[in-house]
Structure formats: structure tokens, C-alpha cells
Image (tube, rainbow, N blue to C red):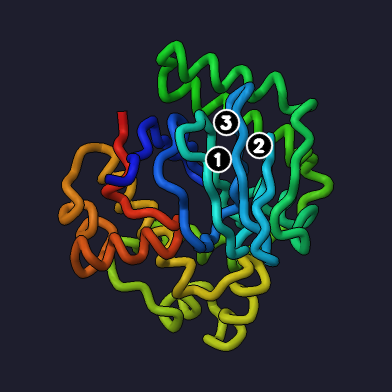
């Protein structure tokens, strides 16, 4: 039997934190979020590079939509996923866009990592863990609003509208019309602003919605329907393509 990941998964607008004991190795996958992987003090993780070589890291960042293989079997780790459309996500993407997998210096992050590890070990509240995770991302991004490349205001409105309508059928034509753009112009601006087309972006948001329901105690089937997937098999396939593991291999505390 493959080892299951155990820990806590927490969500906020623009990101999520997965923290605890890693389980089975994650096969080749890619996801829309920027991934920040922070092993606890004394632990390490490894990623497989494009040449097939395994490289050890004490801290790493994976840019959005970059294929990768990840392994941290039995290691304690904090994984922070950041939406590329968020303020911090845009700054991180701008800084590391062409890098793929980035080795982060653990020295400036040491206090943040130790804080997350201690809070998790002391059964801190969800709010405290989220605050620590968000502060860690702000440390990495620099969070200087003057450096932030602003999204087109029409795409900002479209992103808000998409989230509001996530439980319903969302079409490119309807969203474009709602923000007074032609479908072709909307498609161009959306990809320019988010780095991905509308369909994979919707898939990412729906996956987050289903995962949040599953973590909250819903069955795989219920969670799948909440996110708009046809059934639990569809949800599981999509989850594995995004994270390299199945949702059944994740055991929330």
C-alpha cells in the first residue's frame, strides 16, 4: 500500500497551504499555481529536472504550469500554492518565469519555516497557519506594490465574475460580453494576464472547490459534484494530473 499524506490543507483567496507528512511520490504533473515547497528544519525534498536527474532541495519554488516530479516520502513539509493572478503570484512569476524549478535560499526563510513547523506541531489555529503562510509568500515576493504589474481592469472583473458563477456553466462568450469585450479580445487579454486559457483556469478553480469540500469531510463523490465534475473518477483523474497523486491518498487531520 502506498503511504498516504497526512496533515492540514487550508485555503484563502489566492492560495492554499498543505502542511504535514508527505506520502507517496508525486508523478509527473503540472498545475496553474506557483508552488513553494518548504521542508521542515532538518528535512529535505527532491524534484526531478527536465533531464531526468533528481535534485535535493532545502527550499524550492516551481513556476506556474511547469511540469515536475516531486518526492518527499516521510518528510515533514509545508507546500504553499499561490494563484499567479494574485499580487504575490504575479511578482513571483515575473521574477522566476523562465526558471522552472528554483532553489530558494533557506537562510532568509529560516525563521518563517521554523515558525510554520512550530505552529503545526503546536496545533495552531487555521487562521494562525494561514497568516504564517501568507507572510512567508510576502517575504519571497517582496510585495512592493510599485513593482506589481497590474492586470487589465476588465480581466480583474472577469476573474471575480468567474468565481461568482463557478457553480454554473461558465462560457468564454458570456464572460467576454459581461466585461464588454469581443471573445477574441477577451481570450487574448485573459491569457496575457493569467498565463493560461479560460478552460484550464476554470478546471483549477473547480479542483480547489472540490478539494476544499473533500478536506471538510465530504465524500469523494460529493466533493466531485460540488466542483462541477461528472463523478469521483473524473475528479480523481484531474487531481492526479494536477498534483501527481490521487485525492484518496491525502488524509486530512
Residue 47 horizontal side relative to residue 7, left or right: right
Residue 93 horizontal side relative to residue 36, left or right: right
Label drawn at residue 130: none
First of labels 1, 2 by sequence position: 1
Q: Secondary structure at mark 1?
A: strand
Q: Residue furthest top?
A: 122
Q: Residues within 10 Å of mark 3 (few under 14, many from 20)?
A: many
Residue 21 horizontal side relative to residue 214, left or right: right
Labels 1 & 2 near each other (Cβ < 8 A) = yes
Q: Secondary structure at mark 3?
A: helix
| Location of residue 88 in the rendering, given as x and y in whole percent from the top left corner | 67, 45
Residue under numbered circle 1: 80
Residue under numbered circle 2: 137
| Location of residue 35 in the rendering, given as x and y in whole percent from the top left corner | 59, 48
Labels 3 & 2 near each other (Cβ < 8 A) = yes
Q: Is residue 251 above or below residue 242?
A: above
Q: Is residue 53 above or below residue 135?
A: below
Q: Residues within 10 Å of mark 2 (few under 14, many from 20)?
A: many
Please name whichever residue, 88 or 236, is drawn nearer the observer in this view of the structure: 236
Q: Nearer the viewer, mark 1 or mark 2?
A: 1
Estimate the spatial distance between the alpha carbons at disc 3 and disc 1, rounded to whole Å: 7 Å
Residue under numbered circle 3: 133
Amino acid at each position: 500500500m502506498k503511504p498516504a499524506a497526512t496533515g492540514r490543507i487550508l485555503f484563502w483567496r489566492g492560495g492554499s497551504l498543505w502542511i504535514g507528512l508527505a506520502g507517496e511520490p508525486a508523478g509527473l504533473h503540472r498545475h496553474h499555481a506557483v508552488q513553494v515547497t518548504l521542508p521542515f528544519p532538518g528535512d529535505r525534498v527532491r524534484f526531478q529536472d527536465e533531464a531526468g536527474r533528481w535534485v535535493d532541495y532545502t527550499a524550492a519554488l516551481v513556476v506556474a504550469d511547469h511540469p515536475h516530479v516531486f518526492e518527499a516520502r516521510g518528510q515533514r513539509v509545508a507546500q504553499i500554492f499561490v494563484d499567479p493572478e494574485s499580487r504575490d503570484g504575479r511578482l513571483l512569476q515575473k521574477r522566476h518565469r523562465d526558471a522552472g524549478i528554483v532553489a530558494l535560499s533557506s537562510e532568509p526563510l529560516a525563521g518563517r519555516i521554523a515558525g510554520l513547523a512550530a505552529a503545526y506541531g503546536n496545533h495552531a489555529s487555521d487562521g494562525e497557519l494561514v497568516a504564517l503562510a501568507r507572510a512567508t509568500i510576502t517575504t519571497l515576493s517582496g510585495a512592493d506594490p510599485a513593482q506589481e504589474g497590474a492586470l487589465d481592469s476588465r480581466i480583474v472583473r472577469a476573474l471575480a465574475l468567474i468565481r461568482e458563477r463557478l457553480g454554473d456553466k461558465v462560457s468564454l462568450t458570456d464572460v467576454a460580453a459581461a466585461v464588454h469585450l469581443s471573445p477574441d479580445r477577451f481570450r487574448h487579454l485573459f491569457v496575457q494576464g493569467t498565463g493560461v486559457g479560460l478552460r484550464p483556469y476554470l478546471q483549477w478553480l473547480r479542483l480547489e472547490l472540490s478539494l476544499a469540500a473533500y478536506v471538510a469531510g465530504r465524500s469523494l463523490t460529493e466533493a466531485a459534484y460540488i466542483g462541477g465534475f461528472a463523478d469521483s473518477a473524473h475528479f480523481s483523474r484531474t487531481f492526479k494530473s494536477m498534483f501527481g497523486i490521487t485525492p484518496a491518498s491525502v488524509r486530512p487531520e
